[in-house]
Amino acid sequence: MTQSRTHTCGQLRAAQAGQQVTLVGWMENVREVGNNFAFVVLRDFYGTTQVVVETGEMMRTVKAINKESTISVTGTVRLRENPNPRQETGQVEVVPQEIRVLGRCRYNELPFEISRSREADETARLKYRYLDLRNPAVKNNIVLRCQVVAAIRQAMMDHGFLEITTPILTASSPEGARDYLVPSRKHPGKFYALPQAPQQFKQLLMTSGFDRYFQIAPCFRDEDARGDRSPGEFYQLDMEMAFATQEDVFAVLEDVLPPIFSRYGLYKTASTAPFRRISYNDAMETYGSDKPDLRIDLTVTDVTDLARETGFEPFAAGVVKAVPVSGCQLTRKQIDKLCADVQVQAGQKPYWLRMDETGVLAGGVAKFFAGREEALTQKLGLTAGTLVLFAAGGRDEARKTAGVMLKMAGAAVPGHMDAQRYEFCWIVDFPMFEIGEESGQLEFCHNPFSMPNGGLEILLAAERGEVDPLSIYAYQYDLVCNGVELSSGAVRNHDPDIMIKAFEMVRLGEEDVKAKFPAMYNAFCYGAPPHAGIAPGIDRMVMLLAGESSIREIIPFPMNKNAQDVMMGAPSRVEQRQLDELSIQVVREEE
């Protein structure tokens, strides 16, 4: 142990009784019992130890110290008269001969109680994150993150991957999100960009002759926060393989991830290889989402033809999806609450009916199915006690609403969700192109660097009008766990001719490709190997392992939802001389 202490606060046991020890840590709590007797809880990174004050002199010393001050305690270990079986050091206590203050807490009142910091307002937690992290429940998530990253590194090296770091200051490129730009002092008017991902660099490593690359890579995107996404920066297990197919990538992650999830996860059961594979279209039709939670046994059924005949106006046009939920014991009030929650999340109103215990359809929109009860029962396999939720609208609207209904009903109705496990799946066969909502024209759907399924021939056929571009699939894949997208990956488009033709489909020519991706285009012209990769998010992985609902709980110093670091005061204004050095003029300031 270090020179300032003989033991940690989580180390003493009955075997040390009678020994003189020195402990250091934070004074977590003082419980006074009479004028000259008190119990002091001393906490460090490793645990807590009870210190018993039994003299007036020592009592005066302790009373002069504010909680959360760091102190050194030298004293004798003795067995407790009343052991605490819930505490690892609960068999012993320390009777002090000396207590010294190492770092005084100057405040009588703390922003929140350390042991209950997770109950505090999030703004206060982020502002005083260094206090929040003293809470063992918060600290443990960061320790878990460290352990998971170490296990990932070892597993990747065991699979023959080399860890190679790529640049942080690079060129801006269109990768789907907003760049963080960094002005150049030496090149006035020009900017670096922080990488949204090491995408181009890892592909260039494949053209350089490296066979297997990985990196715990920092990525920077100027995007809004949500529960499973932190604004600003995040980390991912970035990996790429030369001379590889989609199957090669799957084989590596199916071998690397299950042992880590089984060992470190809140749940000890995880999918084993091979993970289930679901096409994008099947996922959207069956689960209403391309991020299905396979722990839920509910599915979506298309009832458009049947529902359109009911005369119910919302079902008269568009698409109608149904989610039957068997064994539902929810009350009418609970069903209304479930539907209201679905509407808030999906933005579309759901509808419902229920087959009662006598086999009669009742409630909600049941009256509109008069005369069609048997057809609906056969279509959905209805049994007594089944709740049916309906979503109506355009195809995408109905799918989305149905997906939200499925997820919420699976959690609300007992018996439909095996929550205590990690269920992985691959979503494959993503469309290569889509019609842009704003442009109304053909655009890349997922990743412009992906190889189309069918290669150059399928693109030429589309150009000739023989194939609908929207029917072209790409070798793109997502890794999903418990309804959370962990990663997107792809077999890369390594052929310059195929790359140019793919970009021509979205109205960008060869010169545009050369201008936007000069290094990668030129490198591919020197003979690039077929290669494929993926990049699971470290933050999301640890969030799932820890059983947290917010990604901020597993990041040491996260930003708030508005991309602000309230602890450090970032972003902040800078001095005029700094702006002058960078040839930058602020033309509008917002308070």
Image (tube, helix red, strand yellow):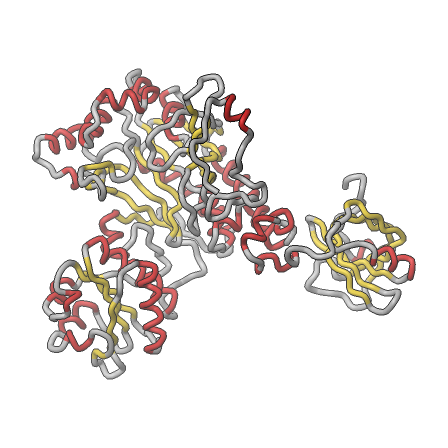
Q: Position of residue 325 (x, y in %)?
A: 29, 69
Residue 327 versus residue 140 in the image, above or below:
below
Residue at 87% over, 60% down: 59
Residue 309 sits in quarter: bottom left
Q: Position of residue 394 (x, y in %)?
A: 19, 55
147 with respect to 473 (left or right): right
Spot the residue most to the bottom: 358
137 vs 161, nearest the viewer: 137
153 vs 445, nearest the viewer: 445
Residue 225 versus residue 157 in the image, above or below:
below
434 with respect to 65 (left or right): left
Residue at 74% over, 59% down: 29
Q: Position of residue 371 (x, y in %)?
A: 11, 77
User: Which of the image's four quarters has the N terminus?
Assistant: top right
517 with respect to 90 (left or right): left
Q: Position of residue 332 (x, y in %)?
A: 32, 77
* Tag count: 0
Residue 380 sits in quarter: bottom left
Residue 329 versus residue 144 in the image, above or below:
below
535 vs 311, nearest the viewer: 311
Residue at 48% over, 35% down: 216
